[in-house]
Image: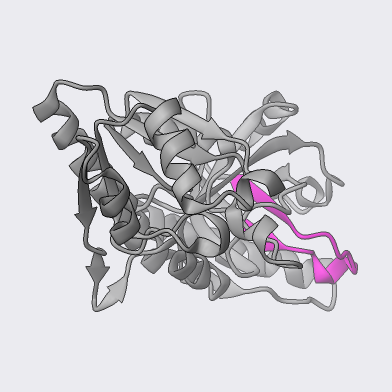
Amino acid sequence: MATIGFFDGVHLGHRTVIGRSRDVARLLGLPSLVVTFDIHPKSLVRENNEVLLLTTFEHKIELLSAAGVDIITFINFDPDFANMPAEKFCRDILQEKVKARAIVVGDDFRFGKDARGDQELLRHFFQHRGVDIHIVSKLRIGGMEVSSSNIRKFLQEGDVERAALFLGRLPSARGIVEPGSKRGKNLGFPTINLRNLKEQQLPKNGVYAGYARYDSHRQKAMIYVGAKPTFDETERMIEAHLLDLPEQRENLYGRQAEILFLKRTRDEMKFENTEKLREQLEKDRRNILDILREDHG
């Protein structure tokens, strides 16, 4: 029992397909299997088209497993694979490698060289091979398709609440906590800092209410995404001030943390001096604490 796709974000639309796959697998007495890829197909197929991802490789595996997938098979999406004809994909991957007895895909699923494969080709290829094809219609919320590209658009606009609605969870970014310049500490707002996030789709620059998660802990956080224009820096990064236990940050250096975005509170700003910045940060902290007190998620 197989379903195929990149599944970036493992959003509600993906989980609808996976849920159908799981149901069919249960009826057939088979494990549910996802066939996915190591890189986003568009990043290789289209020149100069780097795709920023909603989930890291490891996070995607966690989410697929949590959705009830029994087996995850990764395919190296290299130029040879990108140029594989759709019929060869059906034969070599789905029939011989995966040995699929049933296949579940979304109604917009495309595969093979130049994306020539579709649901009709799947049905035609497998109609005499004893493999059932199940097509799942697109999920829509408020008339808009639930898709990874739409969620990226929401994040680019800073609309983390709408992104969360389509994801079925808070949007987030993951990285290794690094020591910073200590400016936040000197201002009374020590932070944990995540850099080297160039492959992840971050929300629009600004300040957010949210959470920092590490190990099994989740702390309330005041989050900044941007490049610190007050100090004329250019590298885009995440800084999170831990509102419950700010002194905990030094214990996190070198460890992975996940920053979860609940609500955008203001745009990125450049301040005349550090005192003006400190005053604004104090306002931000009060506002964000009020927002997080009302969050029961």
Task: Depth check: give the residue in front, 91 or 249.
Answer: 91
Q: Does 172 appear above or below 165?
A: above
User: Does residue 108 sit above or below 246 in this rendering?
Assistant: below
* Left or right for 98, reference 141: right
What percent of the width, then of the height, locates residue 38?
A: 60, 39
In this image, 61 relative to 198: left or right? left
Q: Position of residue 250 (x, y in %)?
A: 73, 29
Whole-percent x, y for residue 167 in the image: 36, 55
Q: How many marks?
A: 0
Q: Is residue 268 above or below residue 115?
A: below
The residue depicted at 28 percent of the width and 29 percent of the height is 32
Note whether residue 295 is visible. Answer: no
| Residue 228 magenta | yes
For this orientation, the residue located farthest to the left is 27
Residue at the front extreme, as displayed: 128
Q: Quadrant of residue 102?
A: top left
Coordinates of residue 193 in the picture (x, y in percent): 72, 44
Residue pictured at 29% horizontal, 62% vertical: 107
Tell me if 115 is positioned left or right of 165 in this view. right
Seen from the viewer's position, the closer of residues 265 and 227 is 227
Q: How is the image coloured?
A: one colour
Can you say which quadrant of the picture contains the N terminus?
Answer: top left
Residue drawn at 81 percent across, 49 percent down? 186
Residue 109 lies in the magenta stretch: no
Is residue 209 in view?
A: yes
Q: Which quadrant of the view contains residue 70?
A: top left
Q: Which residues are magenta?
A: 223-241
Q: Say left or right for 224 vs 145.
A: right
The front one of 292 and 58 is 58
